[in-house]
């Protein structure tokens, strides 16, 4: 944010307003019932979308004009601010933000008490935007994909522990894909790897018994009840 203050103060102001608005109930703003956003959330989403980087430390390197391959910093590489700005426009677009949050609501997540990992929410927002803009997926198609992945990744606590490494790996793999079909197939494979027969017959029942009314498994159960209308 300090770098943005120096080079792009308007960008910093927009980020701060988006985050401040998410804390105060009001129509037509970023406010929602799932997450109170921070500058870290927004910058992470923009760097993920614009540069396919999942580690937050890369944000500073990119915005100070450091080439991640050569390690050199030059005036020319500060043109990355333009690329960051384009990604930021999409991250801060209220239509995108509300459509994504509605998608999570359709997956049964309607309260901040159900969100055990704010990073998981932001990572899924990045994938929503990547699918929508880079792979040109239709709104209904990307919403269906994100509903499935958000639910599964939260249920299995995929983004817990070394979450930056896991997210970085996903972004690297996604950057190699060429079509929307490949993008969907990638997450289908990821879902199959998480949601195995053993997970449902052993892991999930054990988690529910151990966690009682806490943890991702319980919140996934609550989300399922919301979807079923109970």
Image: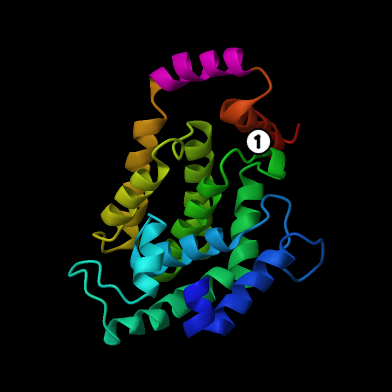
Main SS of the magenta part reads helix
Q: Nearer the viewer, residue 183 or 125?
A: 125
Residue shown at the point (58%, 71%) measured from the top left = 92
Above or below, 27 against 227 in this view is below
Does residue 22 show up?
A: yes
Picture coordinates of residue 106, whole percent (x, y): 64, 48
Residue 223 relative to residue 186: left or right: right
State the SS at label 1: helix
Residue 33 relative to residue 54: left or right: right
Tell me, yes or no, whether the highlighted magenta stretch contains residue 208: yes
Above or below, 7 against 181 in this view is below
Residue shown at the point (47%, 53%) measured from the top left = 123
Above or below, 74 against 169 in this view is below
Picture coordinates of residue 202, whole percent (x, y): 45, 14
Residue 228 relative to residue 165: left or right: right
Picture coordinates of residue 188, whole percent (x, y): 36, 43
Tell me, yes or no, whether the highlighted magenta stretch contains residue 2: no
Residue shown at the point (46%, 18%) measured from the top left = 203
Residue bounds of the magenta highlight: 198-211
Residue shown at the point (34%, 84%) measured from the top left = 79
Picture coordinates of residue 121, whole percent (x, y): 55, 50
Q: Which residue is most to the left?
A: 70
Q: Which residue is most to the right?
A: 26
Number of numbered callouts drawn: 1
- Identify the residue under disc 1: 223
Above or below, 220 against 77 in this view is above
């Amino acid at each position: 944010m300090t770098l943005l203050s120096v080079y792009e103060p308007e960008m910093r102001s927009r980020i701060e307003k988006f985050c401040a608005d998410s804390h105060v109930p009001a129509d037509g703003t970023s406010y929602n019932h799932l997450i109170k956003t921070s500058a870290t959330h927004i910058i992470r989403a923009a760097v993920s979308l614009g540069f396919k980087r999942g580690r937050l430390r890369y944000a500073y390197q990119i915005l100070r004009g450091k080439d991640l391959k050569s390690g050199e910093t030059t005036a020319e590489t500060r043109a990355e601010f333009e690329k960051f700005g384009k990604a930021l426009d999409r991250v801060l677009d209220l239509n995108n933000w509300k459509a994504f949050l509605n998608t999570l609501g359709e997956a049964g997540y309607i309260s901040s008490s159900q969100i055990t990992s704010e990073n998981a929410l932001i990572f899924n927002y990045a994938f929503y935007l990547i699918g929508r803009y880079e792979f040109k997926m239709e709104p209904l198609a990307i919403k269906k994909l994100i509903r499935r992945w958000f639910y599964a990744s939260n249920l299995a606590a995929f983004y817990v522990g070394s979450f930056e490494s896991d997210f970085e790996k996903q972004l690297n793999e996604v950057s190699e894909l060429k079509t929307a079909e490949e993008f969907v197939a990638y997450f289908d494979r990821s879902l199959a790897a998480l949601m195995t027969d053993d997970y449902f017959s052993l892991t999930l029942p054990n988690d529910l018994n151990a966690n009682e009314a806490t943890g991702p498994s319980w919140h996934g159960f609550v989300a399922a009840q919301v979807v079923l209308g109970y």
